[in-house]
Amino acid sequence: MRWLIFLFIFFVLSSLTGCVRIPQSTGYPYTSQAKMQAAHHWSVLAGDVAHQINNDLIERGYLLDPVYVKHTCGLPDACSGGGTFAFDEGFNDLLVSHLVQSGVPTRAALEENTLLVEYKVQVLYHASARYQWPQPGVLTALTAGIVVFRHAPDDIIAVLTAGAVDAARATSTINGHYEVIITTSIQDDNEYIMHRSDIYYINDKDFWHYQRGTSAKEINLISKH
């Protein structure tokens, strides 16, 4: 009977060993990623992009070359009928404003020998639920603070507990299902002068800010005589 037990244990261990030979999934180290929730955040991004454009043009010797910021749908007169969207309109104007303020020669129309500034917006939807916890060490520090006051009067403990909850909420955000990738580039003779991509979280209900609207379907009405 004993040899049967050993045989059974050996079989179970062999089966478990065979199951764990594939790589096991692990999480990434803790990082942070900004969440765009206001037009001010668009302006911050536009200012940062304009600053990089100015620096790259100077470093590469394009001191006097003018630039033109292109809408994602092409020229402004081609953006009607749902061709543009809220972020496209806002970011285009904000980027032009920051470029002009930075002293970069910026044209109102596309001309010959003008560098073309293009940007692309990609909306990502994650169907799975993604969990967000406070930063590492936050809960440990808060818990340690409460333990220190374990012999304090009840009113002090109540205040400390409320402060711990507020601190925990302040260090965490609600992750939705949407992200956006915003890529800005400048080319000259098929060579990239600048190319950068920025990734942000966005609120689920704001995803339409970053997508073209769908045109209404045409319905042909056939009258019967």
Image (cartoon, grey):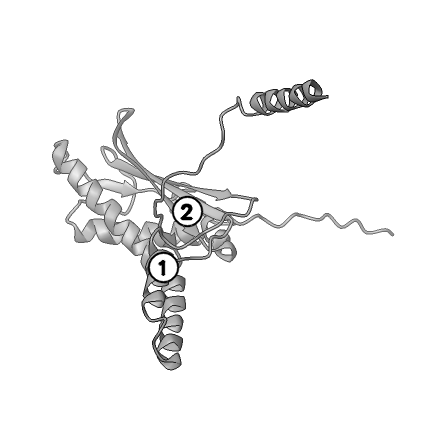
Question: Is 59 displayed left or right of 84 in the figure?
Answer: left
Residue at disc 2, secondary structure: helix
The one of 110 and 122 positioned closer to us in this rendering: 122
Q: Which residue is mark 2?
A: 77
Residue at disc 1, secondary structure: helix
Q: x, y (%) of residue 220?
A: 73, 47
Q: Is residue 146 above or below residue 206?
A: below
- The residue type indicated by label 2 comes to Asp
Q: Is residue 112 above or below residue 109?
A: above
The one of 9 and 74 positioned closer to us in this rendering: 9
Question: Is 60 displayed left or right of 157 in the figure?
Answer: left
**Where does the N terminus fall, quadrant-wise?**
top right
Residue 107 can be seen in this image? no
Q: Which residue is mark 1?
A: 39
Q: x, y (%) of residue 202?
A: 44, 52
The one of 65 and 101 positioned closer to us in this rendering: 101
Q: x, y (%) of residue 188?
A: 25, 28
- The residue type indicated by label 1 comes to Ala
